[in-house]
Amino acid sequence: MKLNQLARCLVVVGLGAHAAAWSQEVQKMERVEITGSSIKRIQDEGALPVQTISRRDLDRQGIVSAEQLIATLSANGNGLDNLASNADVVSGQARGNNGATSANLRLQGANATLILLNGRRIAAHGLNGGVVDLNQIPMAAIERVEVLKDGASSTYGTDAVGGVINFILRKDYQGLQASAFTDVTEHGGGNIYRASLTGGAGNIDKDGFNLLAVLSVTDNKRLDGSQRDFVNSFQPDRGLSPDTRGTPFATLFLPTTTGTTIRNVLSRPGSNANTGPLYNGAAINSVNILDLPGQAGCASQPGMGPYAEKLWNSASASPANQFGCAWDTGRAAVIQQPVKNTNLVTRGQLKLGEHLLTGELLLGKSESTKYFSPNQISSAASTSTLGLPNGTTTRNPFADLAYPSSGAGYQRVFDALVAQFPSLAANQGLPMTFRWRCMECGERAIGTDTDTGRYLLSLDGPLPFLKDWDYKAGASHAYSKSTSTLGSGYHNYVGLANLINTGVLNPFLLAGESQTPAALAALNAISAAGTELYGGKYTTDQFDATVSGPVFKLPAGEVMAALGVDYRIEKYRFDGNTSVNTNDINTWVYNAPFDNINALSGVKRKVGAIFGETIIPIVKNLDLNLSVRYDKYTGFGSTTNPKASVRYQPLESLVFRASYSTGFRVPTFNQLFNGVTESPYTGAGVPDPATCPGNVVSNAPGCQAITFNTLFGGKPDLRPEESKMSNIGFVWQPSPAFNMSVDLWDIKRDGQIQSLTLSQILNNYQLFPEAFLRDSTGALKIVDTRWINTGETRTRGLELSMRGSTPLNGGRLTAGLDGTYLLEKKSKLLDNVPFGPSEVGRFTRSSELGLRWKHSAYITYAYGDWAWSLRQQYSTGYYGYVPPGIANGNATAPAFDPWVKPYYLHHVSVAYTGIKNLTITAGIKNILDQDPPFANSYDSNTGSGSSWEPRVADPRGRSFTLGLDYKFF
């Protein structure tokens, strides 16, 4: 952490430490329910760390989506949770999140952060079946957001391990208001627009009713990697270069698939078909003619560059690949998904004497499209046969894929090849086997439409038979239904092979050349656009009731208590594609992730719970809060989770608080019931850990790179996680104009459900022998990467919050800071092994990045009808990814530096209310136009990632915002 960054923020916040009182509206000191508790109380009486973000805060920051809000929270982790980090090709646990975005408090993961709307649950995303998609939150209708940064399983049940985020709708709104907002980037792409109409009628106290309706449309436009200069995967001097030789001008390859023998132009005369020509004593197995001596060079073609084979291969393999070109998949990718959200909120409240009847109808539609780079097509791809659903096998259409001598591009490639390797002249007429990026096929696109809704009826008021006791009861039905459909870039498997084998499609085109009209027409004829990929639906039916009030008096005050019941039924269905006969290879679509194996006709679980809570004033200024919840789950039995918190106020200006609780999380439906998918490993070379203890590819015996498949999917024998959470801290307010809080928190999770990365499994071979499946000769064939219950994980940190205010030149200056300092993040893979090394400030491939320090700070000056704001977001650097070639000493990168620099953004805004009924807010986000720091995020297995880290940085650059709010009456 750069101390001067923090120091500046602390000085700004401290300006108001000895100033006059806060300028606040006088509010009635009524008891209200605070997130994390079932007992109504004065809002500042609680013992739990709750951060509140108001409607005004959201407007001043130009925040129009829940994802934007979550990105500003210092307590939110850095995982694969947002539209940027999930934009490219993903594998394993990240699949099925098309268009979804989620929250992740205290680095515990999206499935351990509970999302509430008005204190009640909403449905998980229809495709992943376990995590709430924040796109369904109607931000235009939100009055405030309460973030509980503490465990809350004793109140809410499962998921509330990292914390709770409660989105609270506007209440008792009257009038008609239209709003429009635009956020336009300076460099193009990634623009954001929102329009909303809010209407309300009736005053609860005077009229006995209130009606609210909010309609909003938010449109997040796509952002391409090619629109940002910092996206550049060709930086081999810094240790970054794409590990893909599937290029727009195809690379010749020897076929290596077992069961496939194609004698081709690269086959060495007099040797077998899979042995290439010699060059300086080394056998060559791939050639892109552009990279041969005297040719134009890889970089002569858009998006291509030299293949840095030593970064990814062993020393023995590198000479075989020395004439290779690569393609910048990161720059070709869409780095922020386009999403359009339409939300409708209707709410009616009717006063029945002292009771309040509330009905809510929330409807939402999220339309997203996930784009990928064009398909890579390879001869003799991965396996020579394919398994059909009926248990039989058929010949892989690409097993015999080769470009014929009759093709228009053949002779140019052959002549250049023979010029370098004269011995290959004897191969005139033999076909060409290759890897090719089919640009004419178009970028791959998967469109996902998600319909969400919640119907709620609730009643609350005083209990007629218990004085000063209140009750609340509600019944709701929530759902999320998603359907994904193939767009451009996907084609019939057999048809695509036929177009290449007959020479109709030409894989060897230079920039400026194009396929023939006949080839383009034939390609269009086999397009699979419009084919339904899969769909899913998640529903939650819930009934809850709570009563709370005083029990008896002690000398120090009243003992308060609450009792409640909670019953819900969760259902999940996942539909594969049923429109085609998948037992017929002629119906298959190449490289389309149908996931039929994960189809679930319908699964459900019932959850019944009773819970209680009490606040006991032990002595004056010392309160003890005790709560406990008993849950019974279908298939998992029962669990009881208590929580104890204490609040001590020795001085009027000082409050100490502490809490301890236990928690749990049950596996999601997908983690339990997904089918098992077998996929070829296509990443950087790895050895068999059984014969190569160092697990580094080299020329040593047993350390050669091997090929194998990986398994991923559900495991029905997963057990629930258990957790222990603690928090201790203080709140200090030496004057009405300044307050600060510091909290030390600690979370321990046992049996955490994780999908370990392949590197973790290979590096811990002796701990997971059952994950390595071998054939009769002992050769490694399959590595099982499915979900498992791991050992213990521990995360510990400090949270700092400061607020200050002072009068200045007739106006008021306010400032604030919220920061998180990560003290510890470590894990052990099994209970009986030691903890691994610290994960703080260290790169991880798919889990949370443990950044040491993050903060969000602001300073606002209000004068008359004007309000100016300056905000800063900051996160420290970390040690990044080290490619295998650098790790084993095979490659040199003169400018390689594993340290990823800190990242910071500054935003300014101004609001003006001097025109009757009109509020104008304008701003500049990222006023310094700060690019993300260089970070090697490239994943050689999926081909995704590039030169920046989407889990940390915002790729949009400087943008200009304008918001207009007009109230008609």
Image: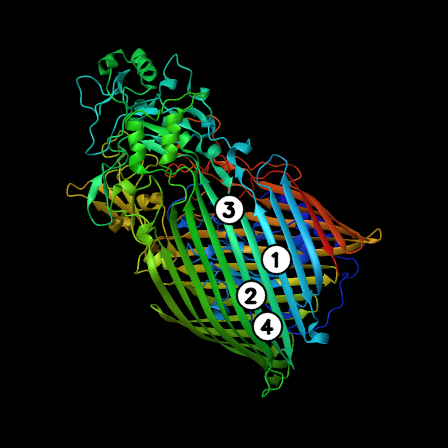
Within 10 Å of the Cα at label 3, are there few (<14), some (14-19), or many (20+) other Cα atoms? many
* Amino acid beneath label 4: Thr
Residue drawn 31% across and 13% down? Answer: 415
Q: Residue 43 is drawn in which quadrant?
A: bottom right
Residue highlighted by disc 4: 358
Residue highlighted by disc 2: 361
Indicate left or right for 536 with 211 as reference: left
Q: Is residue 391 visible?
A: yes
* Amino acid beneath label 2: Leu
Report the mark closest to the observer, 4 or 2: 2
Residue highlighted by disc 3: 83
Q: Nearer the viewer, residue 433 or 33?
A: 433
Within 10 Å of the Cα at label 4, are there few (<14), some (14-19), or many (20+) other Cα atoms? some
State the mark number for residue 215. 1
State the mark number for residue 767. none
Q: Is residue 308 visible?
A: no
Of the residues under marks 3 and 1, which one precedes in the sequence?
3
Report the mark closest to the observer, 4 or 1: 1
Residue drawn 38% across and 19% down? Answer: 291
Q: Position of residue 893 (x, y in %)?
A: 44, 27
Q: Is residue 735 above or below residue 499?
A: below
Residue extending farthest bottom = 465
Of the residues under marks 4 and 1, which one precedes in the sequence?
1
Of the residues under marks 2 and 3, which one precedes in the sequence?
3
- Cα separation, mark 4 vs mark 2, equals 10 Å
